[in-house]
Image (tube, helix red, strand yellow):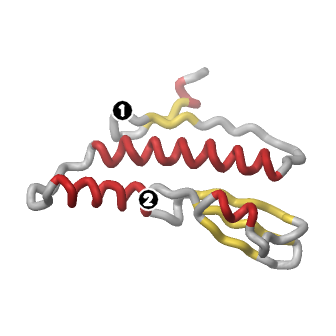
Amino acid sequence: MTNDSLKTSKRRPVAWYEEVIPVRGCKLSMGNIKDFYRDLSAINRKFGEQVISGLPRNDAMSDEEWNSHKSTLLDDAFCLTITINGIRDQKLYGESLEIFDDIELPKPIESIFFTNNNSF
């Protein structure tokens, strides 16, 4: 690995590594997609826990209020959102694994988009 491929953040101790891997095409089952979502969601949540643990505490808040505030931040700011696109311009949006079992799930699926940018 070269130094050029290692991207570091100004925030410590967090560092990002990114590698572009071209995929010409692949076939995934719904089970594969669900597993992928679980993995991405766990990574995103772990990152959120690290960020939130470094926040300065508001002295005006009680322990219960502070813990509730941190929990709200973790759930609202560090969630993974999903957009599932069908071939006839159908779109289904969700923020949990249940989206993949929704009766409105487009069939056939054209693309699935995961992001955490909408949450911030």
User: Looking at the picture, which amino acid does disc 2 mark?
Assistant: Asp
Left or right position of 79 against 71: right
Asked if residue 57 lies left or right of residue 23, the reply is left
In the image, 25 versus 33, the foreground residue is: 33
Q: Nearer the viewer, residue 94 or 7?
A: 94
- Residue in the picture at 21% in, 56% down: 64
Residue sitting at x 83%, y 71%? 106
Query: Tag 1's secondary structure?
Result: loop
> Residue type at mark 1?
Pro
| On screen, residue 47 above or below 119 | above
- For disc 2, the neighbor class at 10 Å (few under 14, some 14 to 19, many from 20) is some
Q: Which residue is mark 1?
A: 13
Residue 25 as seen in the image, left or right of residue 15: right
State which tag comes first along the sequence, 2 or 1: 1
Q: Quadrant of the N terminus?
A: top right
Instruction: Name the quadrant of the C terminus.
Output: bottom left
Tell me if mark 1 has few (under 14), some (14-19) or many (20+) residues whose alpha carbon lies within 10 angstroms of its own.
Answer: few
Q: Which mark is residue 75?
A: 2
Q: Residue at x 90, y 67 (%)?
A: 108
- Percent across and percent down for residue 68 are 29, 59
Q: Position of residue 82 (x, y in %)?
A: 65, 62
Identify which residue, 42 or 20, lies in the foreground: 42
Name which residue lies at 55% across and 34% down: 17
Residue 81: image quadrant is bottom right
Front disc: 2 or 1 = 2
